[in-house]
Image: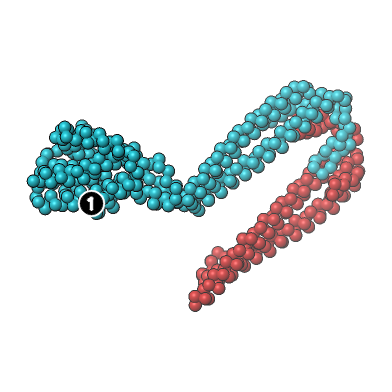
Amino acid sequence: MEEQMQKRGTVTSLASLFPPEETHKASERVQNAISERWEHLGQLKKFIADNANLINLVQTLPNELHHNIMVSFGKAAFFPGKLIHSNEFMVLLGEGYYAERTSKQTIEILKRRGKILDCQVESLKAEIQDLKAEASFFYATAAEAKDGLVQIVEDYVEETYAHDVSEPGMSETDSARSFKDEKSGIKVDDEEFKRIFSIMDELEKEEEAENATEDEEDEKNEDDSGPSIDRAQEVESSLVKDSNLLSVHKDESSDGKAPVLNKSTLTEKALELPRNKETVQAPAMSGKEAFTGSIVEHTQNLESSQMEQSSTRGSKPVSRFKLRRQ
Amino acid sequence: MAGMDEIRQEKIQRFEEFVDRRLKPDLVHAIAERDKIFDQQKVFSDLRKNIENLEKNSVTSLRTMVNLGSEVYMQADVPDTRRIFVDVGLGFHVEFTWSEALNYISAREEKLDRQIEEYTRLIASIKAQIKMVCEGIRELLNLPAEGSS
């Protein structure tokens, strides 16, 4: 059963996508960035405190006509002296330009500077929040990778009806066989899948038309019973059924006849099997309950329930196959 | 032979660690200390020039701008510049006349020069040690001697 080895999706463990040392490095880098921001924040806080002190000072200086101070003379010396003109300030506006202001005007300027500093602090805090979120994401990813979470990627194959179905009859069977041969090792590309889907659909329609009257009631019953069956059982039964089908198919090919119905089941099987394989495999790879389930396609259930139908039909239709052969 | 190689590897690693963890930080520290002294030297030479300037122009009263912080200035008046307080270290300031201050400053500058000399020697010796250890590592690795060094 080499068909079972073929998968449509790819399963990669998160640990291989994000190796532990890489995630560690990344989180370290983010931590460094955060501490840098904290340092900058501390600096800004200091500026704000200085600014507040200066506003206080400028406010109180004009209360007196003059203040006795030590006037610094270079860094290492000073003279005893006093501040005069206590309501005249020279404020640096930038680029070496100074403005002469009164106490009140100076306070206004300083308050505007304080607002700018506050804005900077706000933006810095937001940045730190962002970085923290990033860091927590890295940690979460590292933890998931450690737990052995897997990522399952499966390309969505669109079923196009516009695609014209190729030649009917024997030649189709041949193409199906060649398809089966190709499949032995490598994946079949999407084109092939599309073609086979369209063939399958057509054949199903034919079958439906043939058995419309007989099967209608049966199908209804089976539809009711379908969804209630456990998934594991479903998969199991479908696998069993597949082996049955294969044997049936072998019988028929040895006979030399290749009925249309058999072909349809064959292709169906060929397409279904890999999917079933995947659902069986995914939980096993994850090891624990980590299988998120979000990757499972909805079509899966539909088709497996279809298969359920065909399998239950298969038990009955064994007789139908025989009928057809006779 | 393998054992020898292992021992050699270990030795090389120890030497490299010595260079990186001990000698290089020492070197950085010594250079930083010397820079500090350079700064001080500059401060005192500036002060000396300023006092000489005052002396030359016989300025006895001074009007200047005082920085209140954040580049906000206010006018300040110094009624008598003949008495100057100079920082002598450890937070002490001594009241000097101009000539006294100049004497003190020249003595201080001499000391700073000596300290700078000392640190320069220290830096040179650390550099020499680093060079020597690197040569040792080279010998252990059996590499040919570099032409430039």
Residue at 61% over, 63% down? B17
Which residue is nearer to you in this view: B139 or A177?
A: A177
Residue carrying label 1 = A243
Shown in cyan, the chain is: A
Q: What chain does badge 1 belong to?
A: A
Measured as percent of width and height from the top left, residue B90 is found at 84, 49
The percent coordinates of residue A262 (x first, y second) are 16, 44
A181 sits left or right of A146 in the view = left
Q: Residue at x 59, y 46 (%)?
A: A32
**How many callouts does the rendering have?**
1
Which residue does the image show at 35% across and 44% down from the upper left? A230
Q: Which of A176 and B145 is in front in this view?
A: A176
Quadrant occupied by the N terminus of chain A: bottom left
Q: What element carries label 1?
A: helix
Res. A291 visible in picture: yes
Mark 1 crowd level (few <14, some 14–19, many ≥20, 10 Å Cα): some
From the rendered image, report the letter of the chain displayed in red. Answer: B
Report which quarter residue B97 is drawn in: top right
Residue A170 placement: quadrant: top left
